[in-house]
Image (cartoon, grey):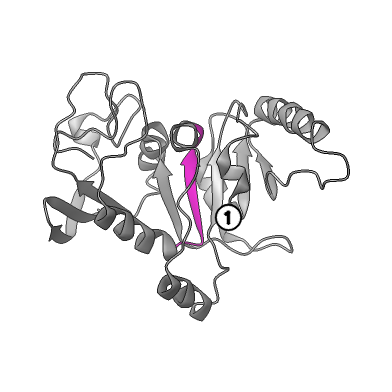
């Protein structure tokens, strides 16, 4: 985030301002995860997700008996995703967390894309799992479901939330976030409508989540913060 607490400019464009050091820091965090969770807005902004490419991190995943890449879980209540997005070309496991209405929308979009595929080619493999829940999401039930292995997927014990702000806010409100990683970048964005790490309606001060600082690292002009939720 910027030094004034913004994760993007007012038009919600992708945050391209972190350094290569921050990208490496984020990859190390993702490499420990069984799965990541990102919102549809985050996916639209970037078009891809962060996969693990560092050979040492990949070797560590094998030693921990994790699959090569974390499962990338996209949460989209509306199901209105672009089948041509580069995300669907990445060699990663993908799940969709959506609503009944969103499932219908995505099914139609995926079917249209599959129909337009070249003759004789395999249909696109968009999502390995489509997971339909009602709104508002019962995040405690979702986390319980993730933690239980099935014949089709491993248990997810380490989940990293990649965005967006409203999703983070709803998980904080349900007391389901254990750690918070923040990188403070040396720039100011400003603007009252520019998004911050926590979206939604916000918290009153008596109910605001309280943090305990676990570690601080400084590299160049960036500060890497790790907090524990009390």
Q: Residue at (28%, 35%) from the top-left corner?
A: 7
> Where residue 13 sits: x, y (%)?
36, 28
Eyeballing the image, is 6 above or below 66? Answer: above
Q: Secondary structure at mark 1?
A: helix
Give 125 or 192, whichever is nearer the viewer: 125
Q: Which residues are magenta?
A: 33-40
Q: Residue 85 placed where, x, y %?
A: 58, 36
Image position of 202 (left or right of 93): left
Magenta-colored stretch includes residue 114: no
Q: Which residue corresponds to mark 1?
A: 146
Q: What secondary structure do most residues of the magenta stretch adopt?
A: strand
Q: For the point 56% across and 43% down, which residue is it?
A: 87
Residue 184 picture quarter: top left
Q: Position of residue 144 (x, y in %)?
A: 56, 54
14 and 30: which is toward the camera: 14
Q: Where, by quadrant of the figure, is residue 76 drawn? A: top right
């Amino acid at each position: 985030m910027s030094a004034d607490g913004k994760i993007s400019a007012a038009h919600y464009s992708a945050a391209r301002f972190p350094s290569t050091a921050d990208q490496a820091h984020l990859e190390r965090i993702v490499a420990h995860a069984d799965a990541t969770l990102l919102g549809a807005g985050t996916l639209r902004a970037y078009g891809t997700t962060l996969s693990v490419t560092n050979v040492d991190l990949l070797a560590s995943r094998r030693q921990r008996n994790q699959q090569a890449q974390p499962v990338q879980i996209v949460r989209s209540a509306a199901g209105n995703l672009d089948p041509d997005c580069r995300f669907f070309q990445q060699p990663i496991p993908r799940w969709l967390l959506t609503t009944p209405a969103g499932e219908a929308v995505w099914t139609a979009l995926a079917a249209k894309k599959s129909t337009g595929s070249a003759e004789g080619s395999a249909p696109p493999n968009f999502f390995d799992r489509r997971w339909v829940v009602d709104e508002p999401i019962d995040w405690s039930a979702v986390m319980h479901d993730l933690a239980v292995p099935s014949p089709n997927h491993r248990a997810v014990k380490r989940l990293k939330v990649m965005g967006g702000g409203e999703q983070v806010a709803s998980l904080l409100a349900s007391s389901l976030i254990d750690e918070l990683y923040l990188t403070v970048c040396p720039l100011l964005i400003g603007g009252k409508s520019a998004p911050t790490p926590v979206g939604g309606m916000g918290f009153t001060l008596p109910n605001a989540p309280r943090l305990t600082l676990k570690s601080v690292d400084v590299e160049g002009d960036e500060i890497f913060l790790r907090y524990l939720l009390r």
